[in-house]
Amino acid sequence: MLLRVRVTLPDRPGTLGQVARTLGVSGADIVQVVVLERLGGRAVDDFTVVWPGAARVERLLAGLAAIPGVRVDGVWRAIGAPTTTGQDAELLAQVAANPADGLATLVDAVPGLLAADWAVAAVVPVDWASRSGGGGATVGYASWRAPVPPRLPEVTPLRGRSMTTPDGTHHAIAPFGRAGLVLVVARERSETLSAAAFHSTEVDRLTQLVRACAVILGDRLDLVGAPPVVAGP
């Protein structure tokens, strides 16, 4: 299976090589490395690896923990292929080519781009500010892996951000800037794996995608979640 491994490590020569060797010795086949952050002598890297299904992840965690200064921030199952350059542009092109299904295209594609489990386009009511906790969001469209009904956090249509709910589910949230529409992406905790929270660079990426789609789809977004028009007799 395909795993995403997020590691915080000292940003100095040799440490990345130690991590890579440890992954290989543990049985992981590295297919991609993405640097999320380099700041203050530390780096945050995402490794996408092919992992033998029968092997225990505990061996991998123990090996990484033995490297001085290395911390494992999360290990979780990745859906789809590793991210490649141009995927965001290709997605936006698909949305523009078929705007009638543009929102569905975006919602279904985002979990694969961000190594998440599911996504939902949620509609926040216009009076959300007067409600306790800003709740009351309804589902406009849900990706195919979303639970029924989706377990939505308390969202508001103000800004992109990450958050973690009490059950350990990590969320990335990005507003479309119209019609109270918000894209919610989730990584769920499993019995054997623990996903990392969404990094700020991932939230920024999601926010840019959502804003671009909002420009492409325009007034179509105002119809999401609206009651159907019933024809007269």
Image (cartoon, rainbow, N blue to C red):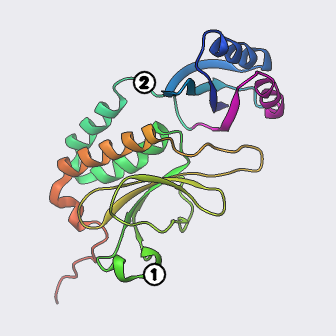
Amino acid type for the residue under numbered disc 1: Ser
Q: What element carries label 2?
A: loop
Instruction: Give the labeled residue for mark 1.
Output: 132
> Which residue is pictured at 69% across the width and 33% down the height?
72
Question: In the drawing, does residue 64 fall left or right of residue 224?
Answer: right
Q: How far apart are marks 1 and 2 (CA)?
A: 41 Å
Lateral position of residue 23 relative to residue 184, left or right: right
- Earlier in the chain: of badge 1 and badge 2, it is 2
**Where residue 163 sits: x, y (%)?**
52, 56
Quick one: label 2, few (<14), some, or many (20+) residues within 10 Å?
few
Position of 137 with respect to 1 (left or right) is: left
Q: Where is residue 7 in the image (x, y as percent from the top left)?
A: 64, 30
**Boundaries of the magenta span:** 54-78
As helix, strand or loop, the secondary structure at mark 1 comes to helix
In the image, residue 92 sits, relative to residue 21, either above or below, namely below
In the picture, the quarter occupied by the C terminus is bottom left
Residue drawn 26% across the image and 43% down it:
95
Q: Which image quadrant for residue 27?
A: top right
Residue under label 2 = 84
From this view, report whether residue 201 is shown above or below residue 121: above
- Can you give x and y, in whole percent of width and height, for residue 67 in the image? 76, 21
Please state which of residues 93 and 35 is positioned toward the viewer in this rendering: 35
| Pick the front one: 144 or 216 | 216
Q: Which amino acid does label 2 sit on?
A: Thr
